[in-house]
Image (spheres, rainbow, N blue to C red):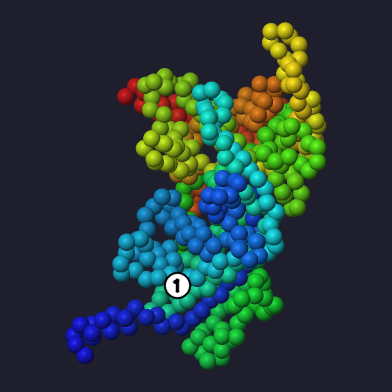
């Protein structure tokens, strides 16, 4: 054997994995909000059709989509949002080499494709880009997409292959952190994840641990039922905690993510109308309130896209009020809400995550309206229409800001104030009084490196109670100083 053949043989032998242990994890993933798993089919009647299994026509969730979401979550947990990935990180150990790493290894974790347990219930959502200057729809900026209804379930299966040279505790810790993100509902899937789509959760797990160096356990792995969907008959028993199921402790690992979470409960003062792109079966009003499936029932919702658009427009107005916009680069808004530069073909994702909110205790009422001819003062011919807004009700808004700066927190507080006092309406037809809100309570939590700082705001008997008004006022002052200081510079 020549020297070249010998070195090639040694390299092949070195890259071969000697598997000594196989850990199989099963769970049932349930969608908590509408989810868009697009197929990219250009021939579909909708702009973004749903990805389906070609045989059963059930919804398809690919293993690559699952693995990508888990890898991003694990990297953020270990280093914070937007951090780079090194060769010795947990994410690299569990999911394989980073891009352009010729010496890296393949992923020891297998994430299987999965299809929904049943033929899913679909919703058709449409949206439109609003011109911030005119407040009307931009030309040729309407789109529609198919989404899976909340409540759709997918059986999950993962298999971790551990070789003799692997750091077993590190691999199991990485797997536990990643799957704990699914357990806690902090991982989202599909498109428009930062506007309320794709929230999901796994509440139970089944774990098998095979030592394949033992002939008995090796045979058990061979006889294991790999292809049956869902949970298998016990044992092992189903467990609610993946840490207990994997027998892993995370006491030495701190969550490094820097984020601000704001939850606020509002009552609707009057009516609310967010237009739905799909009508009910049979005769329906011309315009109906947007509704989405929750536990098999259609419930009115405040969509994340609508709320984010309202917040962005008011944030621009606040900044322009504090300083002359011609002298101030409006990067604060684009840094917070994201931006698309169509000329340069570049895009920036939003650091503000706005969740979709279910509205409870509402009443539907059909109203007839007609357009008035401004010249005659009479009814305009052919302009009679009816609409069905919702009246009353309450909802809880949840938004998250990643890597917040003090002046950005100040801007969020001003937005919260405008929503709280009814000065900032949500939804359509705000000019006739719809969409006004009344604040009930709010909780603000800043989490960073395992530390938490919290504030509460409550409206009790027409009086506002704030846990630490002085520190919140400092955030607003930081916003004013940031804007006026940059404008002067």
Mark 1 packing: few (<14 Cα in 10 Å), some, or many (20+)?
many
Task: Identify which residue is drawn at 72% across, 7% down.
Answer: 376
Image: 479 above or below 377: below
Q: Farthest residue in the left direction? A: 3
Residue 359: percent from the left, percent from the top?
72, 40
Whether residue 377 is visible: yes
**Residue topped by disc 1:** 108
Q: Which of the 4 image quarters holds residue 106?
A: bottom left
Image: 194 above or below 59: above
Task: Identify which residue is drawn at 78% across, 43% down.
Answer: 281
Q: Which of the 4 image quarters holds residue 305?
A: top right
For mark 1, give the secondary structure: loop
Residue 375: percent from the left, percent from the top?
69, 8
Whether residue 471 is visible: no
Image: 409 above or below 207: above
Residue 409: percent from the left, percent from the top?
49, 36
Task: Identify which residue is drawn at 26% across, 81% down.
Answer: 8
């Amino acid at each position: 054997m020549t020297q070249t053949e010998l070195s090639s043989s040694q390299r092949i032998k070195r890259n071969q994995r000697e598997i000594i242990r196989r850990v199989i994890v099963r769970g049932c993933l349930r969608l908590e909000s509408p989810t868009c798993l697009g197929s990219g089919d250009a021939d579909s009647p909708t702009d973004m059709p749903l990805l389906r299994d070609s045989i059963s026509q059930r919804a398809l969730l690919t293993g690559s989509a699952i693995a990508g979401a888990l890898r991003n979550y694990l990297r953020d947990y270990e280093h914070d949002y937007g951090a780079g990935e090194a060769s010795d990180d947990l994410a690299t150990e569990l999911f394989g080499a980073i891009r352009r790493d010729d010496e890296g290894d393949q992923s020891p974790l297998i994430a299987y494709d999965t299809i929904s347990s049943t033929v899913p219930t679909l919703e058709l959502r449409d949206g439109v880009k609003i011109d911030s200057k005119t407040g009307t729809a931009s030309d040729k900026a309407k789109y529609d997409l198919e989404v899976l209804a909340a409540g759709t379930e997918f059986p999950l299966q993962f298999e971790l292959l551990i070789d003799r040279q692997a750091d077993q505790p590190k691999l199991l810790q990485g797997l536990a952190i990643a799957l704990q993100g699914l357990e806690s509902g902090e991982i989202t899937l599909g498109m428009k994840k930062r506007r309320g789509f794709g929230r999901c959760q796994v509440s139970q797990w089944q774990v098998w641990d095979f030592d394949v160096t033992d002939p008995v356990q090796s045979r058990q792995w061979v006889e294991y039922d790999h292809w049956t969907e869902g949970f298998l008959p016990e044992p092992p028993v189903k467990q609610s905690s993946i840490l207990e199921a994997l027998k892993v402790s995370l006491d030495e690992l701190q969550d490094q993510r820097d984020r601000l979470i704001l939850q606020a409960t509002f009552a609707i003062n009057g009516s609310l109308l967010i237009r739905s792109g799909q009508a009910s079966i049979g005769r329906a009003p011309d315009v109906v309130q947007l509704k989405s499936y929750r536990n098999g029932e259609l419930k009115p919702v405040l969509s994340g896209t609508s709320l984010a658009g309202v917040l962005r427009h008011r944030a621009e107005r606040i900044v322009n009020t504090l300083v002359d916009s011609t002298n101030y680069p409006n990067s604060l808004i684009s840094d917070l809400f994201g931006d698309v530069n169509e000329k340069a073909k570049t895009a920036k994702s939003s650091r503000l995550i706005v969740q979709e909110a279910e509205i409870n205790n509402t009443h539907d009422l059909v109203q007839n309206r007609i357009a008035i001819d401004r010249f005659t003062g009479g009814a305009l011919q052919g302009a009679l229409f009816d609409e069905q807004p919702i009246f009353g009700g309450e909802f809880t808004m949840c938004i998250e800001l990643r890597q917040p700066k003090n002046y950005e927190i100040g801007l969020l507080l001003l937005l919260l104030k405008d929503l709280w006092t009814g000065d900032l309406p949500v939804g359509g037809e705000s000019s006739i009084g719809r969409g006004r809100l009344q604040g009930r309570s709010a909780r603000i939590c800043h989490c960073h490196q395992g530390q938490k700082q919290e504030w509460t705001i409550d409206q009790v008997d027409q009086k506002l109670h704030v846990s630490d008004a002085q520190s919140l006022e400092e955030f607003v002052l930081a916003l004013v100083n940031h804007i006026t200081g940059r404008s002067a510079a």
